[in-house]
Image (cartoon, rainbow, N blue to C red):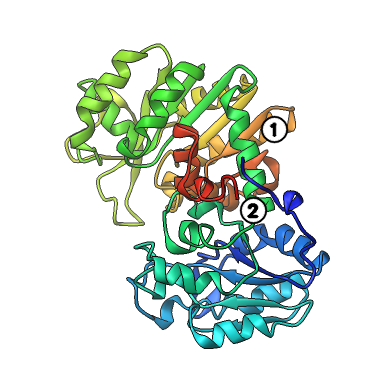
Amino acid sequence: MIRTLADLPADPAGKRALVRVDYNVPLEADRVADATRVEATLPTLRWLLRHDARPVLLSHLGRPAGRPNPAFSLAPVAPVLAGLLGVEVDFAAPCDGAAALRASRGLAAGRVLLLENTRFLPGEAANDGALAGRLARLGDFFVNDAFGTLHRAHASTTGVPARLRPAAAGLLVERELAALDALRDPPRPFVVAFGGAKIGDKIDLMRGFLERADGILVGGAMANTFLRAQGVETGASLVEEAALELARSILAASPDRIRLPVDVTVTERPADPGGSVADVGVEAIGPGMAALDIGPASRARYAEEIRGCASLFWNGPMGRFEDPRFAAGTFAIAEAAAEITAAGAFSVVGGGDSAAAVRRAGLMDRVSHICTGGGAALEYLASGRLPGLDALAGA
C-alpha cells in the first residue's frame, strides 16, 4: 500500500519534508520558459505549508551527465516558485553538501528550500547508496511528487525512501495515478490515439490496449512504419525499419481495431520552412516525399471516431506539429478531445509532445487530465508498476 499525505502517521508541523519534485523545465537565457511543471506541485507544497511543515525540494533538470553545468542549474526556478507560491524560496548548492544540510536544518517556518540539480552528481542516476544517505539527512520524512521521474530508479526517487521514513506520495502523484487507473476499466467506447516516432517505446502498452480499446488511431512517424509493414511505399518518410516485423504482428493480432491514415501531408523539403506541401493518398507517396502529418481525410475520420467515444487516451503527436505546415493533424485530435470532454467524456493526454501540443492549442483546461510524465504514464499503464512507487510501498 502506498501512503499519501493524509496517511502520514504524525503531525508534520515543524518537520522537514524532503520533497522530490520534477522541475525539469525549459530554460531560455537563464529564465524559465514554461512553468507548468512547477505549477503542478503547488497543491502539495501548499498542503505542507498549511500543516506547518518545512519543504526541502529535490529535482533534476536536463542531462548534465553527472557533473555541475551552469546551463542546467535550478537557480532560475527559485524566484518563479516564490512568485507562484507567495513565500520566500531559499536556494542551496550542491544538493548533498554541508551548506544544503545547514540550510535544511535552519529553514524557517513558512519558507521553502530548493536545492541544486540532483543530476550534477554522478551517483544520482546510478542510485548510489551513499548519495541517497546524504540526501536522506535533509528531511524528517519524504514525499515524492515527481510523477515524471517515477520510472527512474535513481538515488532521489528510490534510494532516499529506502532510508527515510515515513515516505508518501504527493497530491500530484495521487492525481496522476487516479487518472491512469481509470483507464484500466474505462467508460466505453474507449479510443486510444498513438503518435510520435517509435513503436518500440509503446509496444507493451499498444498490445495491452488491443484487448481493451475499441479503436486505436495511429499517426506520426509511427504510422509510416505501419504503412510500410502493409507494403505501402513511404518514399523519404521516417520509418522505424527495425520495427517492421513488430508492426506486422500487431496488425495481424487485431486488424479490425487499428486505424491507419488514408492520406498524409507530404513535402520534398522537410528542413525548408518555406517548402511546398501537398495532401496525397497514402498510395500516392512518391520516392522523394516525406509524410509529416496525417491528411485531411484521416483527420476527419480520427476526429469522428473520437467524438463517438466515452473515454480517450492520447500519447504522441500526429505529425511534426512544431512546424505549422504539419500541425493540423495533431490539433484536430486536441480539438476533438476538448469537444468530448465538454460533453462529459473522460480524456487523458499522456504527457510529452502531445501535452505540449494541447498547450499550444490553448486547450489545457479543456481535457480531463494531462500527465506530467509521458514515459512514466506509459510504463504504469503497461505494467501497473513504477520503481518510484515500489519504493513508497509500505512506507
For this rendering, which residue is in front, 298 or 93?
A: 93
Q: Is residue 68 left or right of residue 175?
A: left
Residue 157 visible from this viewpoint: yes
Q: Separation of disc 1 and disc 2 at Cα?
A: 31 Å
Q: Say which amino acid is labelled 2.
A: Ala
* In this view, the mark in front (1 or 2): 2
Above or below residue 277? Residue 245 is: above
Q: Is residue 48 left or right of residue 258?
A: right
Q: Which of the 4 quarters of the picture holds residue 308?
A: top right
- What kind of element bears circle 1? helix
Q: Identify the residue at image location x=34%, y=40%.
A: 201
- What kind of element bears circle 2? strand
Q: Earlier in the sequence, mark 1 or mark 2?
A: 2
Q: Identify the residue at image location x=63%, y=80%.
A: 104
Q: Which mark is residue 168?
A: 2
Residue 48 is situated, as x and y percent measured from the top left of the image, at: 75, 64
Q: Residue under label 1, please give it.
A: 341
